[in-house]
Image (cartoon, helix red, strand yellow):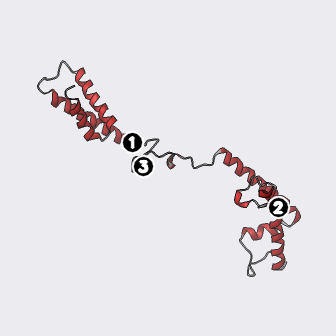
Amino acid sequence: MAYQDVLYNTALRILNDDDQAADATQEAFLSAFRALNFLPGRLLRAWLLRTVTNACYDELRRKKRRPTTPLEPETADGEEVESPSWLADPHATPEESLDQAELEHAVQHCLQNLARGISRRWWFWPTSRGWITRKSPLPFTKPLGTVKSRLARARLRLRACLQGFRELLPSAFRLEEESNL
């Protein structure tokens, strides 16, 4: 064990990693033990240094061929990142998917109920093309004021219907009445 510190320091300078340097040093000593009958006595230190250097080069080649990404990467100042962004699933969770499907079903339900009371074209035509103005071409013969008032009533009915599904709505779209209940 006379050469242990020298071999470890050599491996550490090459690999820049404590654990890998310890592994390379151990590999050099295991190689020396296996070749104990063939080792030249006078050149033992040089032979061990060459063995540890070769073990380090093998490790560097292995890392280059198969690069790895740690599951808990470190920041620039050496602290572990709790939940790395690359590890997060970009898709919605099953619960979020279910909530989204229920909300879509509720909106479709309210739109179907809305369509029973007014012509569907009053709702879908202007809202699918943005706000209507005096210069917007209207596919119906009603005056612009009538179209806008019917749209306003349709929006109020839709809002009232969706409040029946308030637990599905995002908090920004819930009415203040809920806090008074």
Find numbered disc 1 in the image and state the secondary structure of the residue it sits on: loop
Judged by depth in the image, the label closer to the viewer, 3 or 1, is: 3
Task: Name the amino acid, label 2.
Answer: Ala
* Residue ranking furthest to the right: 117
Q: Residue at x 20, y 32 (%)?
A: 49
Q: Closer to the N terminus: mark 2 or mark 1? A: 1
What crowding class fits label 2: few (fewer than 14 Cα within 10 Å), some (14-19), or many (20 or more)?
A: some
Q: Is residue 175 above or below residue 78?
A: below
* Residue ranking furthest to the top: 37
- C-alpha separation, residue under disc 2 versus residue under disc 3: 50 Å
Residue 125 - label: none
The answer to whether residue 60 is seen in the rendering is yes
Task: Name the amino acid, label 1.
Answer: Pro
Q: Residue at x 13, y 23 (%)?
A: 41
Q: Residue at x 82, y 66 (%)?
A: 156
Q: Closer to the N terminus: mark 2 or mark 3? A: 3
Residue 23 horizontal/vertical position (percent) = 31, 31
Q: Is residue 51 above or below residue 72?
A: above
Q: Which residue is mark 2?
A: 160
